[in-house]
Amino acid sequence: MNSFWRNVPLLATSQSLMMSSMSLILTAAALVGFSLAPDKSLATLPVAVIFIAVMFTSIPAALLMDRIGRKNGFMLATFFGMGGGAVATYGIIQADFWLFTAGGVLVGMFNGFGNYFRFAAADAVDTEHKSRAISVVMLGGVVAAIVGPNLANLTQDSIDDAPFAGSYMSIIVIYALALLALAFLKLPTVQKPKDQNTASRGRSLVTIASQPKFIVALICAMLGYGVMSFVMTATPLAMSHHAHSFSDTSFVIQWHVLGMFAPSFFTGHLIHRFGVLRIMFVGGVMGLMCVAINLLGSSVSHYWAALTLLGISWNFLFIGATTLLTETYTQQERGKTQAMNDFVIFTTVTISSLTAGTLQHHFGWQVINIGVLPFLIFTLICILWLGNKLRRDERFTESQLQEVLSEHEV
């Protein structure tokens, strides 16, 4: 527990700073992109490149931190973030769209490292406290839902003739604060075996990925995150199509973000009490409820209820899947396992984010929601399958034990 109270709050602080920066960027980037882009259809490119950079950084980040340590890797990444803020600020001042977009690439590289904050917390505590550690770290999103948009609003006009340049300058300070918090980390050291044969390096990635727990954890995280990103990205366009004001859209998105992260106050406790698969199943059902509400109407109340449920669905699925994944690897295997997991997840998120707007424009809100139903249903089927398999394995083990005891008595 000493490691819990020393490291988890610091990682939660770093997570909140990373998410605050992202919520600020998501509030301002499209507006800046539209004002600077030579072709207005490229207005959302500065946001898209962040997710693309996360996708391509996730594997190198995990492998690098496996060699130099997570603390050193996280601290190194903050310089990417500060550089991204500086480049984007300069791009806005110079009215250079491509320079502004390049700043987003550097921010995405930081996020590629920062997405491992949750794993660092889980790996720093004992098995009993893993889900709680992940939940505490994910609480940073609650702070981000409040800090990011308000900071963007307060700083947008702080530099004359360069709207939002001050906002991007403020994220340099955010990443500097993250660097300060990370400097106090004292993560447990993974002992590197002197014998570098195959056994000492752990199992192959194919062997690890063939475990039922790994398969279900990856599917649930990938599809849960993908569905959330897909529906969330399309929501502002759908609300605009239904003639809702920007303030209504901001209200809905803010509640969605709160739904994503506020449950982290108790998600870890729920997993510990009821079991990870039950909580993940509830998350999948909430995703179906979100779709049902979206199909029933298009009022602000419908969007609010649906997107809040979507956020909670993501929280239960993502934290649950992360917890389940930590049961599938050893300390020597964590780098490559987590790298594969996050690469697949954020590849899915990138595709979802890039396609949602186009599909919403051409096919409409109803098709968007009907289209995610098969993925949610498949997620629930996978959870039920794993639950049944684990129960069968447990009964089989008990049966074998009884046979051994009977033979011993004879």
Image (cartoon, rainbow, N blue to C red):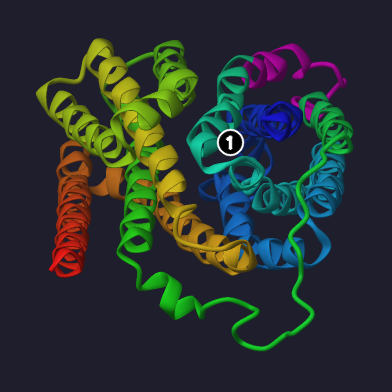
Q: Give the residue displayed 82% in from the left and 50% down from the top.
A: 80
Q: Amino acid at mark 1?
A: Ala
**Could you tell me residue 375's position as x and y percent?**
21, 51
Q: Establish if 243 lies above or below 186.
A: above
State the residue in front, 90 or 342: 342
Q: Give the residue displayed 38% in from the left and 53% down from the top.
A: 222
Q: Give the residue displayed 78% in from the left and 55% down from the top.
A: 189
Query: In the image, 143: left or right of 207?
Result: right
Spot the residue most to the bottom: 197
Visible in this render: residue 260? no
**Could you tell me residue 406's position as x and y percent?**
13, 64
Quarter holding residue 198: bottom right
State the residue in front, 44 or 79: 79
Residues in magenta, as a range: 147-165
Q: Give the residue displayed 45% in from the left and 60% down from the top.
A: 328
Label 1 sits on residue = 30
Q: Establish if 200 lies above or below 192.
A: below
Q: Quadrant of the C terminus?
A: bottom left
Visible in this render: residue 84? yes
Looking at the rendered structure, the secondary structure element under dot 1 is helix
**Could you tell me residue 312's position as x and y percent?**
35, 26
Q: Establish if 55 lies above or below 111.
A: below
Query: In the image, 237: left or right of 104?
Result: left
Magenta-span inclusion, residue 324: no
Magenta-span inclusion, residue 150: yes
Query: In the image, 326: left or right of 15?
Result: left
